[in-house]
Image: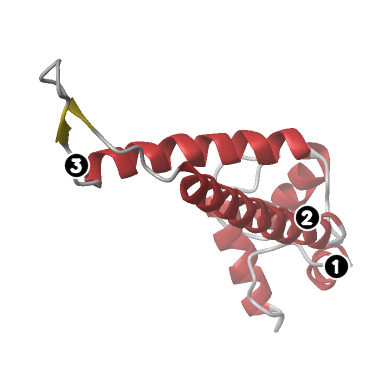
Amino acid sequence: MMKKRWLIAGLGFVLSSMAYASDAPVQNKSVAQNSGQTQQKQPDWSAVRNKADKMAKDVEERSKKLAKEAKSKYHQYKNEAGPKTHQEIKNVQAKLKEMGYKLGQIDGKIGARTHKAIRRFQADHGLPQTGKLSPEMLKALFH
Protein backbone atom coordinates (compact mmCIF):
# COMPACT_ATOMS: atom_id res chain seq x y z
CA MET A 1 0.00 0.00 0.00
CA MET A 2 2.82 2.36 0.87
CA LYS A 3 4.59 1.58 -2.44
CA LYS A 4 1.44 2.54 -4.34
CA ARG A 5 1.23 5.83 -2.49
CA TRP A 6 4.84 6.68 -3.30
CA LEU A 7 4.40 5.59 -6.90
CA ILE A 8 1.35 7.82 -7.27
CA ALA A 9 3.12 10.63 -5.44
CA GLY A 10 6.10 10.27 -7.76
CA LEU A 11 3.84 10.40 -10.79
CA GLY A 12 2.10 13.46 -9.40
CA PHE A 13 5.48 15.00 -8.66
CA VAL A 14 6.68 14.49 -12.21
CA LEU A 15 3.45 15.83 -13.70
CA SER A 16 3.38 18.79 -11.34
CA SER A 17 7.00 19.66 -12.01
CA MET A 18 6.42 19.46 -15.75
CA ALA A 19 3.41 21.77 -15.44
CA TYR A 20 5.35 24.08 -13.13
CA ALA A 21 8.33 24.21 -15.44
CA SER A 22 6.23 25.02 -18.50
CA ASP A 23 4.08 27.67 -16.78
CA ALA A 24 6.65 29.29 -14.52
CA PRO A 25 8.03 32.62 -15.69
CA VAL A 26 11.76 32.93 -15.73
CA GLN A 27 12.81 34.63 -12.49
CA ASN A 28 15.97 36.36 -11.31
CA LYS A 29 17.84 36.27 -14.56
CA SER A 30 21.23 37.57 -13.95
CA VAL A 31 24.14 37.70 -16.27
CA ALA A 32 27.18 35.94 -14.94
CA GLN A 33 30.13 38.25 -14.71
CA ASN A 34 32.66 36.31 -16.74
CA SER A 35 30.76 33.72 -18.76
CA GLY A 36 27.94 35.76 -20.26
CA GLN A 37 25.39 32.99 -19.42
CA THR A 38 22.06 33.53 -17.69
CA GLN A 39 21.09 31.71 -14.50
CA GLN A 40 17.58 30.82 -13.34
CA LYS A 41 16.30 30.56 -9.81
CA GLN A 42 15.19 27.00 -9.06
CA PRO A 43 11.50 26.42 -8.26
CA ASP A 44 10.36 25.59 -4.72
CA TRP A 45 10.38 21.79 -4.93
CA SER A 46 8.96 21.33 -1.44
CA ALA A 47 5.70 22.97 -2.57
CA VAL A 48 5.62 20.69 -5.61
CA ARG A 49 6.24 17.64 -3.41
CA ASN A 50 3.49 18.69 -1.01
CA LYS A 51 1.08 19.11 -3.91
CA ALA A 52 2.06 15.70 -5.30
CA ASP A 53 1.55 14.08 -1.88
CA LYS A 54 -1.89 15.67 -1.62
CA MET A 55 -2.78 14.48 -5.11
CA ALA A 56 -1.60 10.95 -4.27
CA LYS A 57 -3.72 10.88 -1.10
CA ASP A 58 -6.76 12.12 -3.05
CA VAL A 59 -6.29 9.42 -5.68
CA GLU A 60 -5.89 6.76 -2.99
CA GLU A 61 -9.05 7.89 -1.18
CA ARG A 62 -11.04 7.90 -4.41
CA SER A 63 -9.81 4.45 -5.39
CA LYS A 64 -10.68 3.07 -1.94
CA LYS A 65 -14.17 4.56 -2.25
CA LEU A 66 -14.65 3.07 -5.74
CA ALA A 67 -13.35 -0.30 -4.60
CA LYS A 68 -15.78 -0.28 -1.67
CA GLU A 69 -18.70 0.57 -3.98
CA ALA A 70 -17.70 -2.14 -6.46
CA LYS A 71 -17.40 -4.69 -3.67
CA SER A 72 -20.88 -3.87 -2.34
CA LYS A 73 -22.38 -4.13 -5.85
CA TYR A 74 -20.62 -7.47 -6.37
CA HIS A 75 -22.08 -8.84 -3.14
CA GLN A 76 -25.50 -7.44 -4.03
CA TYR A 77 -25.53 -9.30 -7.36
CA LYS A 78 -23.79 -12.37 -5.99
CA ASN A 79 -26.47 -12.83 -3.36
CA GLU A 80 -29.40 -12.44 -5.76
CA ALA A 81 -31.35 -15.62 -6.16
CA GLY A 82 -31.68 -17.03 -9.62
CA PRO A 83 -30.01 -19.38 -12.03
CA LYS A 84 -26.24 -19.24 -11.98
CA THR A 85 -25.21 -21.77 -14.63
CA HIS A 86 -25.69 -21.83 -18.39
CA GLN A 87 -27.84 -24.93 -18.10
CA GLU A 88 -30.19 -23.28 -15.60
CA ILE A 89 -30.52 -20.24 -17.88
CA LYS A 90 -31.14 -22.57 -20.84
CA ASN A 91 -33.97 -24.18 -18.86
CA VAL A 92 -35.54 -20.75 -18.26
CA GLN A 93 -35.15 -19.83 -21.92
CA ALA A 94 -36.68 -23.13 -23.05
CA LYS A 95 -39.65 -22.67 -20.72
CA LEU A 96 -40.23 -19.10 -21.93
CA LYS A 97 -40.02 -20.21 -25.56
CA GLU A 98 -42.42 -23.10 -24.83
CA MET A 99 -44.88 -20.57 -23.40
CA GLY A 100 -44.71 -18.50 -26.62
CA TYR A 101 -42.25 -15.76 -25.67
CA LYS A 102 -39.82 -14.86 -28.46
CA LEU A 103 -36.26 -14.74 -27.21
CA GLY A 104 -34.00 -15.91 -30.00
CA GLN A 105 -31.56 -18.74 -29.43
CA ILE A 106 -31.53 -20.91 -26.36
CA ASP A 107 -27.87 -20.42 -25.56
CA GLY A 108 -27.63 -20.08 -21.78
CA LYS A 109 -26.85 -16.36 -22.01
CA ILE A 110 -29.17 -13.59 -20.93
CA GLY A 111 -28.99 -11.18 -23.84
CA ALA A 112 -31.26 -8.35 -24.97
CA ARG A 113 -33.99 -10.66 -26.37
CA THR A 114 -34.04 -12.80 -23.26
CA HIS A 115 -34.32 -9.69 -21.07
CA LYS A 116 -37.22 -8.51 -23.23
CA ALA A 117 -38.97 -11.89 -22.94
CA ILE A 118 -38.44 -11.91 -19.17
CA ARG A 119 -39.95 -8.40 -18.89
CA ARG A 120 -42.97 -9.46 -20.97
CA PHE A 121 -43.45 -12.54 -18.80
CA GLN A 122 -43.18 -10.43 -15.66
CA ALA A 123 -45.73 -7.94 -17.01
CA ASP A 124 -48.14 -10.74 -17.97
CA HIS A 125 -47.93 -12.24 -14.46
CA GLY A 126 -48.13 -9.01 -12.43
CA LEU A 127 -44.49 -9.07 -11.34
CA PRO A 128 -42.11 -6.10 -11.19
CA GLN A 129 -40.67 -5.67 -14.71
CA THR A 130 -36.96 -5.79 -13.97
CA GLY A 131 -35.83 -8.09 -16.78
CA LYS A 132 -33.95 -10.11 -14.18
CA LEU A 133 -34.59 -13.61 -12.95
CA SER A 134 -36.03 -13.08 -9.50
CA PRO A 135 -37.20 -15.88 -7.21
CA GLU A 136 -40.83 -14.75 -7.70
CA MET A 137 -40.44 -14.90 -11.47
CA LEU A 138 -38.90 -18.38 -11.35
CA LYS A 139 -41.71 -19.56 -9.08
CA ALA A 140 -44.34 -18.25 -11.50
CA LEU A 141 -42.48 -19.72 -14.49
CA PHE A 142 -42.01 -23.28 -13.19
CA HIS A 143 -45.06 -23.78 -10.94
**Earlier sequence position, callout 1 versus callout 2:** 2
**Earlier sequence position, callout 2 versus callout 3:** 3
Looking at the image, which residue is at 64% across and 63% down? Answer: 118
Q: Nearer the viewer, residue 36 or 44?
A: 36
Q: Quadrant of the N terminus?
A: top right
Residue 140 lies, with reference to residue 64, above or below; the image says below
Q: Is residue 141 left or right of residue 103?
A: right
Marks 1 and 3: which is nearer the front?
Answer: 3
Which amino acid type is shown beneath numbered disc 2? Lys
Which amino acid type is shown beneath numbered disc 1? Pro
Looking at the image, which residue is at 76% across and 52% down? Answer: 92
Marks 2 and 3: which is nearer the front?
Answer: 3
**Earlier sequence position, callout 1 versus callout 3:** 3
Secondary structure of residue under mark 1: helix
Looking at the image, which residue is at 23% across and 46% down? Answer: 23
Q: Is residue 15 left or right of residue 95?
A: left
Q: Which residue is mark 1?
A: 135
Confirm or deny contact between disc 1 and disc 3 (CB under 8 A). Answer: no
Q: Which residue is mark 2?
A: 71
Q: Residues within 10 Å of mark 3 (few under 14, many from 20)?
A: few
Q: CA distance from mark 1 to mark 2?
A: 23 Å
Q: CA distance from mark 1 to mark 3?
A: 70 Å
Q: Is residue 125 visible?
A: yes
Residue 106: image quadrant is top right
